[in-house]
Amino acid sequence: MKRQLKQALLATAFTLPLAALASSVPASSGRPAIWGDGPCFLMTNSTMYNSCSTRRSYELPLPLSTAGSKTVHVTASGATSSNNVGCAAVGVNREATLIWGGTRKWLPAFGSAQIITLTDAYVPVAGFLYVGCLVDPGATINTVEYNG
């Protein structure tokens, strides 16, 4: 019995850190920030690609189960610096009068899928979290992973 309890505690100790970034959503769960930009975003395997000739905005709401500081990882890609993606994670209070975070970060490299790490969002109790991305022509947003 003691051995089983030790094994259970050990398993919990290893899986809890992994659960910290357990929530993820495909890019297709978001929407263009400007509804008229809808035709610009094409979906393939739930990734979203900007097919227009200019930069467009895309937002992804992120469902939460806890308040507090949030880390968000956006996986995106662009072939060159002309196909960049820049995202910001933002926490908002329920009245939508206060925001936390919002520092925009861009793809660290080009030519393959890259992770943009956003660490400055805070969500109060009963608040909400979203990621807003600027997506250049030919760039793709794949997934968003976060500690919910």
Image (cartoon, helix red, strand yellow):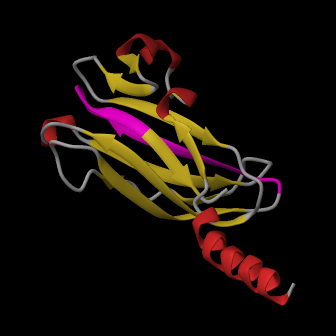
Taking the magenta stretch, the answer to whether it contains residue 139 is yes
Q: Residue at x 48, y 33 (%)?
A: 27
Q: Report x, y in % for residue 76.
A: 33, 42
Q: Nearer the viewer, residue 20 or 35?
A: 20
| Apparent side of residue 128 relative to residue 39 in the rendered image (left or right) | right
Q: Name the residue located 56 percent from the left edge and 39 percent from the top edge.
A: 25
Q: Residue furthest bottom?
A: 2
Q: Quadrant of the C terminus?
A: bottom right
Q: Position of residue 102 (x, y in %)?
A: 49, 56
Q: Is residue 96 above or below residue 34?
A: below
Residue drawn at point x = 27 percent, y = 50 percent:
107
Magenta residues (range)? 126-142
Residue lying farthest top? Answer: 39
33 versus 133 height, above or below: above
Q: Is residue 40 left or right of residue 94?
A: left
Q: Image quarter for residue 30?
A: top right
In screen coordinates, is 82 left or right of 117? left
Residue 99 magenta-drawn?
A: no
Q: Quadrant of residue 98?
A: bottom right
Residue drawn at x 71%, y 74% is 12
Tell me: 97 left or right of 69. Answer: right
Look at the picture and state if 35 lies above or below 76.
above
Vertical arrangement, residue 38 with respect to residue 50, above or below: above
User: Which quadrant does the N terminus fall into?
Assistant: bottom right
- Between 92 and 84, the one lying in front of the other is 84
Q: Position of residue 35 (x, y in %)?
A: 52, 17
Q: How many marks?
A: 0
Magenta stretch mostly in which secondary structure? Answer: strand
Pick the residue in front: 22 or 36.
22
* Quarter of the image where one finds residue 84: top left
